[in-house]
Image (tube, rainbow, N blue to C red):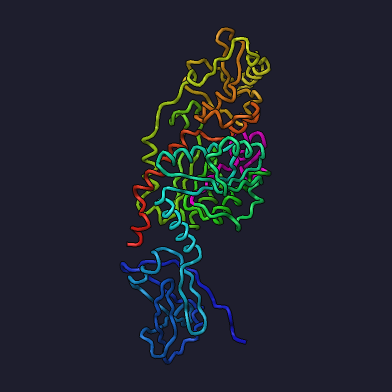
């Protein structure tokens, strides 16, 4: 019985002497069964592929050369016409069987074309679909929605994945503007989400867990490296599968700045590059975007490569730089808390710990703030635990007393709407806010993306012209 399945070569379309080139000199070409007396073939140009078919009377000749102590067939096509079918440096799928070769875009290239055309079509209608991984209480998506809205682009979240049902339910209740009747809420670890059955979207946001990468997380969990964390270490793998499955042309990934140096992020950059994304990564500080908190976050933008031809990513970075604004001082975010309110405490155990740390030569100190302070340090997810180094407000009169910021103040510190933690206990509200983003930063980012994309990206009509 003859061979049924073709042999395959995956090859990148290169350039030679100013024109695209397909050069084949592989032993696999023996599969063609070329007649050495009549090594000729025809080129059949179709809408989505190029077919090379053996024909003794064909116009083109298959040559040969010595290679690795044997002779191999050579097919060399160096024509500008190839650019009508394939983009330069794109991946090709070359199927070889007896009598013919079929050259098509690789499946990755087809996926790239599809996601880019979908994004451009949606952008021309000023309407983008989004998906959210590790959604939390919805701070990142609230910020992105608000920023895009300022750029006259409406958004809706097609699906949101969050492992903690308290956080997800809070976002559904407090962020109804993010969702619509078709939105799917997924209360699950992202590792358990089927990446092959995803709703197709234009934009994907993700704030992967930082517990393995942050300085406090590595110390607390006694980790040598981020990937060693039992639950968060492999999240990047599931994230990448979902990126591939959901068809997003723009991915917004945020994490602690230390994430840049992890093996996880090295893999993310490599895989996103192989999937046809161009990347821009930077670290931003909340106080540069009007927030009170000096929270530093890594932000990685991954844009499908065909959409970055006009240096869209660098233009987004430049536009964002122009949106920086002074921080909001402590006095502007404070509630009028009565002087005898029970939240004012002596916290002697924290003072004793500070003294012990000082005697041991450790740098841990309490953050005791006056209303005149211009900013505060990071308020983490465990802020309600009254930990030793997180900010506390000093009592206006009795300096032996101090208190934690309440959930409303914490929201203002991150430039988040107070309503985003409505109906939540102080503990859960601080968890959501502590795990969340500086809202003003990501609002500015989405606004920059919207403005620059509409200015630099071609509309579908332009592409068709």
Mark yes or no: residue 70 visible: yes
On the image, the x and y values in percent for residue 111 come to 49, 61
Mark yes or no: residue 263 visible: no
The image shows residue 3, relative to residue 144, as above or below, that is: below
Q: Nearer the viewer, residue 459 or 27?
A: 459
On the image, the x and y values in percent for residue 358 come to 61, 19
Name the residue located 38 percent from the left edge and 48 percent from the top edge: 453
Q: Nearer the viewer, residue 92 or 152?
A: 152
Residue 207 in magenta? yes
Name the residue located 43 percent from the left edge and 30 percent from the top edge: 288
Q: Say which quadrant the N terminus sits in.
A: bottom right
On the image, the x and y values in percent for residue 429 come to 62, 30
Q: Nearer the viewer, residue 68 or 182?
A: 182
Q: Quadrant of residue 321?
A: top left
The image shows residue 367, relative to residue 149, as above or below, that is: above
Q: Which residues are magenta?
A: 202-229
Query: Which residue ends up furthest to the top in the rendered image?
Result: 397
Q: In screen coordinates, is 176 left or right of 62?
A: right
Name the residue located 52 percent from the left edge and 15 percent from the top edge: 370
Name the residue located 65 percent from the left edge and 14 percent from the top edge: 342
Q: Say which quadrant the C terminus sits in.
A: bottom left
Residue 439 in magenta? no
The image shows residue 354, relative to residue 16, as above or below, that is: above
The image shows residue 145, relative to residue 122, as above or below, that is: above
């Amino acid at each position: 019985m003859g061979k049924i399945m073709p042999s395959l070569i995956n090859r990148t379309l290169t350039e030679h002497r100013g024109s695209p080139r397909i050069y084949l000199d592989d032993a696999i070409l023996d599969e063609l069964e070329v007649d050495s007396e009549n090594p000729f073939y025809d080129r059949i140009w179709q809408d989505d592929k190029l077919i090379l078919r053996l024909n003794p009377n064909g116009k083109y000749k298959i040559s040969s050369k010595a290679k690795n102590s044997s002779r191999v067939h050579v097919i060399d096509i160096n024509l500008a016409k190839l650019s009508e079918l394939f983009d330069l440096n794109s991946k090709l799928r070359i199927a070889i069987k007896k009598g013919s070769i079929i050259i098509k875009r690789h499946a990755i290239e087809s996926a790239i074309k599809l996601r880019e055309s979908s994004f451009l079509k949606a952008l021309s209608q000023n309407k983008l679909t989004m998906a959210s991984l590790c959604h939390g209480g919805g701070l990142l998506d609230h910020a992105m929605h608000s920023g895009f809205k300022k750029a006259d682009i409406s958004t809706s979240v097609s699906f949101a994945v969050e492992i903690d049902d308290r956080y997800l339910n809070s976002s559904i209740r407090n962020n109804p503007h993010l969702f619509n009747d078709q939105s799917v809420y997924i209360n699950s670890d992202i590792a358990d989400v089927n990446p092959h059955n995803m709703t197709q979207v234009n934009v994907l946001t993700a704030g992967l867990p930082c517990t393995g990468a942050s300085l406090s997380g590595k110390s607390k969990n006694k980790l040598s490296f981020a990937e060693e964390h039992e639950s968060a270490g492999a999240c990047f793998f599931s994230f990448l599968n979902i990126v591939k499955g959901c068809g997003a042309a723009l991915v917004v990934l945020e994490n602690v700045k230390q994430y840049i140096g992890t093996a996880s992020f090295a893999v993310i950059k490599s895989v996103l590059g192989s999937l046809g994304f161009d990347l821009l990564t930077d670290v931003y500080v909340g106080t540069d975007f009007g927030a009170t908190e000096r929270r530093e976050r890594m932000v990685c933008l991954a844009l499908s490569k065909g959409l970055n031809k006009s240096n869209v990513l660098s233009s987004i970075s430049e536009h964002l730089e122009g949106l920086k604004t002074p921080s909001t001082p402590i006095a502007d975010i404070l509630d009028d808390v009565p002087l005898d309110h029970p939240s004012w405490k002596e916290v002697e155990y924290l003072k004793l710990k500070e003294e012990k740390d000082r005697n041991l030569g450790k740098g841990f100190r309490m953050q005791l703030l006056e209303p005149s302070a211009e900013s505060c340090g990071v308020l983490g997810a465990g802020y309600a635990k009254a930990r030793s180094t997180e900010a506390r407000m000093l009592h206006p009169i009795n300096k032996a007393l101090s208190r934690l910021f309440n959930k409303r103040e914490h929201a203002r510190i991150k430039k988040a709407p107070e309503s985003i933690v409505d109906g939540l206990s102080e503990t859960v509200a601080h968890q959501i806010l502590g795990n969340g983003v500086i809202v003003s930063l990501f609002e500015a980012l989405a606004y920059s993306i919207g403005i620059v994309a509409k200015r630099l990206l071609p509309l579908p009509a332009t592409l068709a012209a």
